[in-house]
Image (tube, rainbow, N blue to C red):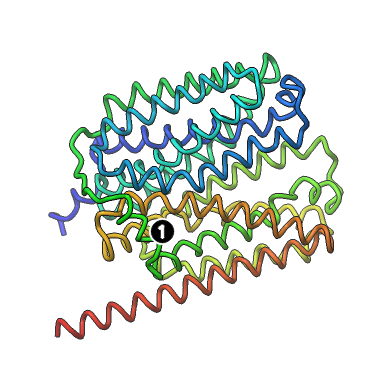
Amino acid sequence: MDTALPKQLLSTKQKFLAFTLTLLTFVMGTSEFVIVGLLAEISTDLNISLAVAGTLVSGFAIAYAIGTPLLTAFVSRFPKYPLMLTLIVLFIIGNIISALSGSYELLIFSRVITAVVSGVLVALSMSIASDIMPENKRGAIIALIFAGFTISNVIGVPLGTLIGQLGNWQLTFWFTTLLGVISLMLAIFILPRKLKVVKASAKDQLGLLANPRMILAFFIPTFSIAGTYTIYTYITPILQDGMGIPTSYVSAILLGYGAFSILSNVLAGKIASNNGVSKLRYVFIVQAIILTSLFFTMGTTFAGLISLMLMAVMIYAMNATIQMYLMNLATVYFPAAKDFASSLTPVAVNVGIALGATLGGYVVANGGYVHLSWVGGLCALTAAGLASLSYRLDSKDALAESTVEA
């Protein structure tokens, strides 16, 4: 018992590494999401419509979803230390170009660069954490790294938006550039220099997507996130029209939502550290119940807000477990594609956001806000079904393997 204890503790270097990787995701999250609060200023300054300005958000998500796995498959053969530093430099350059942009074309170009680089940095960060951290701490650390995005929504985005409103939107991107430089300085000293690299061609790694088990696992987080974003996409009109909350209170409620979503990352770490794969199906059933509850609580302000805050607590509860599960599946079926597999969770999240927003738009156009609740619940139940099927297949494989060994 005593000999196992040191393995459960993080060394000082590992703690600094966890902080650095979390700071990195915080910086990338701020750079990605801050533009939402600046669309009106960008629209006016660049003389484009608000709809065209909105493509700066959707364009980022599309570039992230498509470019991340492709570039990850290509660059994962290179040593991680210089690769991470190079990508952080490219991230800084992308933000500098955004800050200097005087046209829509240059700005969308810089956003695409930033999106793809951010996606690969997240994938490599998760892979490094998986390689370096003690096994019993991996779930909690990966959840912490994911929490960087959540914290960016609570702190980085409001601060960046305020900078843009007090000065100009370009100043906000100088702010994210500065954050990128700070991350680079820390990364130079903190990132481990000698990490194992398993070389494989991009074609071989992309072939992992043809594996039925990987496809099944990929769509688990996709449907979970879609369930939340079916509702969250329309959270402002839900608050105003559905619950009768004055416009002046909406920003404070959204801030509260962001704060509760931080708890989701804490929950994610605890689930992942306690055989999370076996619990996922139940996590999604709870999520489905919470999402559907809004159908009954939307008419009452207090009860409706409780449903929304519980929704925030559940949104990222599966992240760490799914991230580890995808990398473990890659280890079983194709070890050389582990870095590539680590890129799939954020890609699945972006696909889920797009799916949820699309479903939500259809429901609102053909029904009412109240019906978003049960549609979101059905998406979460779909995730529960996929998680249950995946767990059953794992159990079957484990049984077959033990039978062969016997």
- Residue drawn 63% across and 31% down? 35
Classify residue 272 by image quadrant. Answer: bottom left
Q: Can residue 273 be seen in this view?
A: no
In the visual, does 249 lie left or right of 67?
right
Nearest to the observer: residue 38 or residue 200: 200
Classify residue 230 by image quadrant. Answer: bottom right
In the visual, does 349 lie left or right of 169?
left
- Residue drawn 20% across and 40% down? 195
Nearest to the observer: residue 71 or residue 21: 71
In the visual, does 151 lie left or right of 341?
right
Q: In this view, does 45 lie above or below 352?
A: above
Tell me the SS state at disc 1: helix
Q: How many marks?
A: 1
Q: In this view, does 290 lie above or below 397?
A: above
Q: Quadrant of the C terminus?
A: bottom left
Residue designated by label 1: 321
Nearest to the observer: residue 308 or residue 2: 308
- Residue drawn 37% across and 31% down? 87
Q: Where is residue 260 in the image (x, y as percent from the top left)?
A: 59, 47
Q: Is residue 103 above or below residue 298?
A: above
Q: Where is residue 216 in the image (x, y as percent from the top left)?
A: 45, 68
In the visual, does 376 lie left or right of 123?
right
Label 1 Cα neighbours within 10 Å, binned few <14 / some 14-19 / many ≥20: many
Which amino acid type is shown beneath numbered disc 1?
Thr
Q: In which quarter of the image is the N terminus?
A: bottom left
Q: Where is residue 213 in the image (x, y as percent from the top left)?
A: 39, 69
Q: Is residue 243 visible?
A: yes
Q: Where is residue 159 in the image (x, y as percent from the top left)?
A: 61, 25
